[in-house]
Image (tube, rainbow, N blue to C red):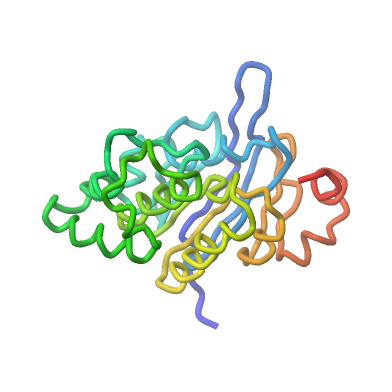
Amino acid sequence: MVYQAPILEVTGLSKQFGGLKAVDGVSWSIQPGEIVALIGPNGAGKTTVFNLLTGFIKPDHGTVVFEGEDITGQPAHTFASSGLVRSFQTAKMFPSMTVAEIVTTAGLLHGSPRTMRAQTDEILERLNLSDKRNTNASELSLPDRQMVELAKCLAAKPKFVLLDEIMGGLNRAECHVPIEAISQLRESGITFLLVEHVMPIVMTLADRIVVLDFGKKIAEGTPTEIANHPEVQRSYLGQAV
């Protein structure tokens, strides 16, 4: 077997807010093309990890290495330029802009408006958003807003995408489109880290799962290993999710 270096390596990542250790010595690595889920109870530190990985806040300790380069604590735009992009739990977009304008703007980091217009059409078609092309963000349904978040990520030409509850608030039928899109995008070479609470989706999509509780990593493994892990069952899976 040929060794393949991880696309992302997190070592000893820690962040404290006042007396609260939001993230406490978290370490793991992700291989190119993997789908990894980050799960845990509310307040476990998942969104803080996302913010640390994408430059929105700086860690107190630890390192983030992306494609062999230490990018710890660099500003958010540096992460995006290198191919590491994220969605937000609450979709962030200007309400008066159309879907096409939002996606095109997200792609200007890597291309001109002219080239991005053609790419926008391709992205919208891929995510079943073509009929919403000229719809203002303020008029979008929740499922469409979530898909526009994913479209914004794709417009930035990512190598690695962090999705923060992209299926939050959707019913099982509405989850079909993002699940299929993520699976297809992985086949095209994009790596994913997901924060998601809907466990059937996590178990279906993820190659591996990392579990946080009170800021600490308490388990890591395949979906089957995590489902049978006693500490995970006590801290998370035994709760209503």
Identify which residue, 231 or 126, lies in the foreground.
Answer: 126
Side of 32 relative to 173 (left or right): left
Picture residue at 71% right of the left edge, 40% below the top: 216
Figure check: 83 above or below 15: below
Picture residue at 25% right of the left edge, 61% below the top: 121
Identify which residue, 177 or 4, lies in the foreground.
Answer: 177
Residue 102: where, in percent of width, then height?
A: 28, 44
Side of 72 relative to 199 (left or right): left
Side of 139 relative to 233 (left or right): left
Picture residue at 43% right of the left edge, 57% below the top: 160
Identify which residue, 147 or 229, lies in the foreground.
Answer: 147
Residue 225: where, in percent of width, then height?
A: 78, 64
Side of 134 relative to 199 (left or right): left
| Quadrant in the picture for residue 207 | bottom right
Residue 23: where, in percent of width, then height?
A: 63, 34
Q: Farthest residue toward the top?
A: 18
Q: Farthest residue toward the bottom?
A: 1
Figure check: 47 above or below 130: above
Q: Quadrant of the N terminus?
A: bottom right
